Amino acid sequence: MTSKLTYLGAISLAAVAMAAATPAYAAGTTAGTSITNTATVDYQVGGVAQTQQQATNTFTVDRKINLTVAETGNATTTVVPGQTNAVTTFSLTNTSNEVLDFALVASQLATGGTPAHGGTDAFDVTNVRIYRDATTGTVGSWDAADTLVTYIDELAADASVTLFIVADVPGGAGAPTNGQISGVTLRATAREGGLAGTQGAAITETTGANTAGKDTVFADTAGVAGDAARDGSHSDNDDYTVQTATLAVTKTSRVISDPFNITTNPKLIPGAVVEYCIQVANTGGAAATSVVINDPVPGQLTFSTGTILLNGTVTAGTCNADGAAGGSYVAPNVSGTIATIAAGATRTLVFRATVN
C-alpha cells in the first residue's frame, strides 16, 4: 500500500498499547479498515521547549481472499443400490478478512478416477444437490430443516458452515455392485458480499502496484478439483461406497426313505420321501434382511406337513437339520422368511415331500 508518511518518528505508547490489545484472528484485520497513527517530536532550542511536530499516516487494509472446503469425518459414506438421499458432509470456512458470498458446485469424479478414500470410481450417483445445515433440527446431520442452496450468502470472516452433498444411488438393472465407489467433489468460489439475498459478482484480483484503495489478493491453496492456488476457489472430495448383500441361491434334494428299502439305500420310487434344501449364501459386504423364499412343489409330489425348517446352516455344502420350525404351505408354494443373513453366512429353508 502506498505510504503517506511524511515524517518518521517514534510511535506513541498509546498506539502500541492499542495494537497489543487487538485479538488475532485467522482472517486478520477487516478489509477496508483505515489504519491511522501519528508520530510526534518534542524538542528544545536553547533550553526552551518548542512547538511539538507531528506527522500522520493513514492507509487502507487490503482484501485477502481465502477459503477452505474440507470433507468432514474422513470416511466414505456406505450406501446400497437404490438408496435415496445418500449424504456426504463438508465444511466451508471463510478465512478472508471480509464478509463474502461463495458460489457452490457439486460434481462427480470421472469413471476410473481415484476417490477420496482410495479405490477406483466406478459409477455415478444421480439427483445431486447441495444443502446448507440449519441451526435448527439436527445440527451436523442432513434433515428437513436444511436449505437447498447454490451459493452461501454473506459468510462472515472466520465463519464456517456445514454443507451436504445429497444424491441418489442407482438401483435396478445396471445398479452398482458391492464395493464399487462413486466420488463426488464440492467446490466453492468466493464472490462479492455485502448484499443479503443476492449472489455477489465475481471477484478479480488486483494487478499492478498497490493503490490507495482496497486492493484484492487471492491467498487460497490449491484444491483437489483442478482449482489452482490463488484462484479464489477451493474444493475437496468425498465418496460413496456400495456395501450390500450379494445372494447366491442353491437348491438340492436327497431321498430320505422309500416304502421298501426304508432308509437303507432308498430309491426315488413312488412313496419315497424327498428332502429339498434351498441354500441362500450372502457373499456381499452387508447383511441381507427380510429374505423371503418361495418354492412351488411339483405336481408329482405331495408336501409333507410340518416339515419346513428355516434359518438352518450348511456344512461342506450339505444342509444341516438345525433350522427352526416355521414357514407356511399354500398349495403349491412352500414359503418362509429369514430375518437376517449376515455377510459371509449361508442360511437354509428345508422341507420334505412324497413322490406320488
Image (cartoon, rainbow, N blue to C red):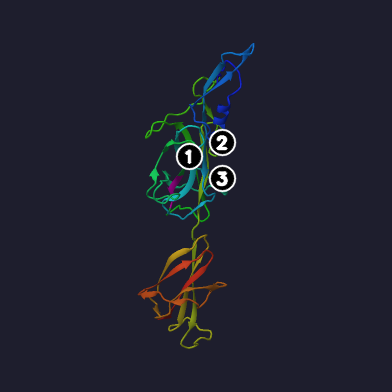
The answer to whether residue 78 is seen in the rendering is yes
- Marks 2 and 1, how far apart in space? 20 Å
Q: Is residue 168 magenta?
A: yes
- Marks 3/2: CA–CA distance: 17 Å
Q: Looking at the image, which residue sits at the far top?
A: 46
Give the residue pinned by disc 2: 222
Examine the rendered structure and indicate whether residue 210 appears above or below residue 181.
above
The boundaries of the magenta stretch are 163-170
Q: Secondary structure at mark 3?
A: loop
Residue 248 picture location, percent across and down: 50, 64
Mark found first going from the N terminus, 2 or 1: 1
| Residue that sits furthest to the left in the current view | 330
Residue 301: quadrant of the picture: bottom left
**Residue placed most toward the observer, 131 or 272:** 131
User: Residue 295 sits in which quadrant?
Assistant: bottom left
Label 3 sits on residue: 114
Q: CA distance from mark 3 to mark 1?
A: 31 Å
Q: Secondary structure beneath disc 1?
A: loop
Name the quadrant of the C terminus.
bottom left
Check disc 3 and give the amino acid type: Thr
Q: Position of residue 126 (x, y in %)?
A: 43, 46
